[in-house]
Amino acid sequence: MEDHTEHKKLLKPIPVSTKADQVEEQVLQYLRLGNFKPGDTIPKEEELSKALHVSRPVIREALSRLRMFGMIDSRKRRGAILRQPDLFSAMERVLMPNMLSNATRRDIFELRLVLEIGIADLLFLRKKPEDLLALEKIVADEQILLEKDRTPENILLLIENDLAFHGKIYQISGNKMLQSLQRIIIPTIKHVIDHQFKMDPLSYGKITHFQLLELLKQGNPEKFREAMREHLTYHFEQLSV
């Protein structure tokens, strides 16, 4: 059993009336100042309750939030231990487009636009032949859909195809954080694109996915970045509407 006596001085008592979020902040401050690392145990509920002068249910609620964020885990005979947090796991659980305001959905979509314009250098650094083959398949499927009438069903398929192309771009980047973030914001992206296609189903970018793919094969990061900006022009124009 680890001795937490040395770290207890970092925990300052707080009033009983303080909410669980303030307890949570105290615990996080304690972990930061105590230089804890993944795998270390943290004080038990009883110890924290005494140190902070609050009830165990309040401590339990604060710790449950840390569990939700993947920061701590309970182990038999060891109590709670620190984990390397999955930074986006909690966001993925709660980020539902229908529960977000128009302003928040807009902010998330703007984040997507900025990321995809800035991703060019990573793509040219890490692209592989099999990645280009996967994009060729997506582009070929898209071409078949574009030759069909824009029925509601085909519009949905085009949206799925669009998400598949851009999702592959994030995958090629090789950046796990970007991939996790893209996975989380996909529902919001889909919500916004679906709305835009319904409003103007004939708008599909000034630079096509085919042209982006050709630049990825033979171009350079700067040309790809400019082309991606052009590809997303329609979405940028909608931001000022």
Image (cartoon, rainbow, N blue to C red):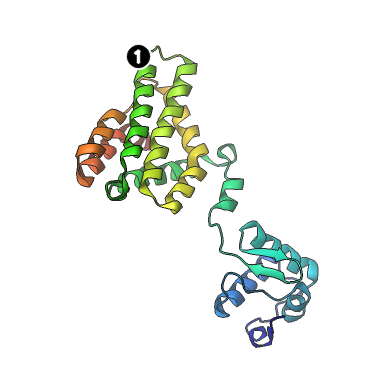
Label 1: how many Cα within 10 Å (few below 14, some 14–19, many 20+): few
* Residue 225 or residue 137, whichever sits in front: 137
In screen coordinates, is 42 left or right of 107? right
Q: Is residue 206 visible?
A: no
Location of residue 223 with respect to 87 vertically, above or below: above
Location of residue 91 with respect to 205 vertically, above or below: below
Q: Residue 126, position in %: x, y?
A: 31, 49
- What residue is shown at x 28% (from left), y 39% (from top)? 229
Element at label 1: loop
Q: Quadrant of residue 7?
A: bottom right
Q: Is residue 9 visible?
A: yes
Which residue is denoted by mark 1 in the rendering? Answer: 147
Across the whole image, how many numbered discs are drawn on residues?
1
In screen coordinates, is 85 left or right of 208? right
Q: Residue 124, position in %: x, y?
A: 27, 47
Q: Quadrant of residue 144?
A: top left
Q: Quadrant of residue 216?
A: top left
* Residue 73 or residue 10, whichever sits in front: 73
Q: Residue 137, position in %: x, y?
A: 37, 27
The residue furthest front is 130
- What residue is shown at x 58% (from left), y 69% (from top)? 38
- What residue is shown at x 24% (from left), y 37% (from top)? 217
- The N terminus: image quadrant: bottom right
